[in-house]
Amino acid sequence: MAAARISHPSSAAAGFEDYSLYSNLSDDELLQLAIERSLTDMQLNATPQTACHHDNKPNASNTNRNQLPVSSPPNPPASQTGAHYSSPNPPMEKPPDPKTFDGTVSRFMTGSGKRMVAYYKADGSLVHIGPEPEKEEEPLFRAIREGDGSRVKALVMCPGTNLMLPSKPGWLAVHQAAWFGQDTCLKMLLSAQPGMINKRTSQGETPLLVAVSRGQLGCVQVLLEDGADLEIPNYDKETPLYKACERNSAATVAALLNHGAAVNTQCIQGWTALQEATVHNNVEICEMLLKAGAKHNLRNMYGIGPLFTAAQNGQLAALRFLIRHGADINTQA
């Protein structure tokens, strides 16, 4: 595969290179480009040694040394022996330690969204390029993700374990358990630290909201039985009931309604759970909501109600259901 040709900055300015130029390259093209550039930099570094007897003035035909020769192959054949390399070794496979590395560390993202990191010496030569290493996962969070109940129990019982310590801003062990559907681990955590049950993430999500959003019915039931607050919304004012309708989960909606969830709460854009249910044409959920006291005449911030939403989205089953239950067919936005 031929790597894309890109004009490179000079070695002295390598630390200030704009790596957005590489965002559209594939991972294979990036690695090919890194190897090609490393070989080219070594050639450039070796050139002054063979031409030191010449005048120091730049050659007019060689003033643009930032531009790679268009005709040069990415990997010169083995028979070409004219180049003098400063090192016979390719870029190292193991990445240097960023804390002790004496050079420039540049981070960028590929077109496919993969995070990459490149290490350069002071002279601009490439030392290593590869995927950015991930941070080591905390033992408790890893055990929860893997569903290792015995390990979670041991860590919970350990006096040195801080269950209120987040792995990232706002993300506690209970959120981890709710996300991955580990209801057994969730019970252990809540038994050891009941005060975590309504803690919110950086997005304002309680463990119940996380479980509902992920469709983890087992965790939803555990949280409801332990007294989780059903009405704490996220920062978009979306409640667990609203998210259950968004996920089109009749079982989750039923569980929330059986524990007294409010049915007419509106999100930040004025949508209700009933209006969200009509989008999915779910008559079963619509019926449960109406029986629980949902109003079919509430409008969102655009002046649109559930019936108009059903008609707008071509959801005939929901449309007929709402009309049978008294929705105004002459409603306007």
Image (tube, rainbow, N blue to C red):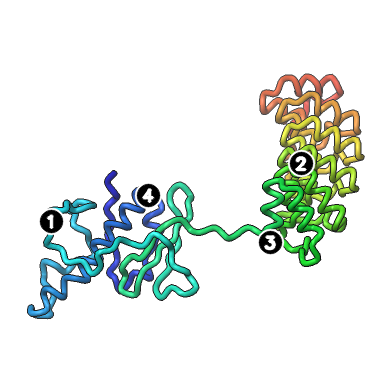
Q: Which residue is mark 4?
A: 25
Q: Mark 2 falls on what kind of element?
A: helix
Label 2 Cα neighbours within 10 Å, binned few <14 / some 14-19 / many ≥20: many
Q: Earlier in the sequence, mark 3 or mark 1?
A: 1
Residue lying at 46% horizontally and 47% vertically, measured from the top left: 112
Q: Which residue is mark 1?
A: 80
Regarding residue 299, the answer to whether it shows in the image is no
Q: Nearer the viewer, residue 113 or 283?
A: 113
Which part of the image, by quadrant, shows the N terminus? top left
Q: Which residue is mark 3?
A: 169
Do the CB atoms of the residues marked 2 and 3 lie less than 8 Å apart?
Answer: no
* Above or below, 202 relative to 229: below
Circle count: 4
* Above or below, 236 relative to 310: below
Real-space CA distance between mark 4 and mark 3, rounded to the nearest whole angstrom: 32 Å
Q: Amino acid at mark 3?
A: Pro
Real-space CA distance between mark 2 and mark 3, rounded to the nearest whole angstrom: 21 Å
Q: Amino acid at mark 4?
A: Leu
Which part of the image, by quadrant, shows the C terminus? top right
* Rendered image quadrant of residue 57: bottom left
| Label ID, residue 212 | 2
Real-space CA distance between mark 1 and mark 2, rounded to the nearest whole angstrom: 64 Å
Label 3 Cα neighbours within 10 Å, binned few <14 / some 14-19 / many ≥20: few
| Residue 78, horizontal then vertical, whole percent | 16, 53
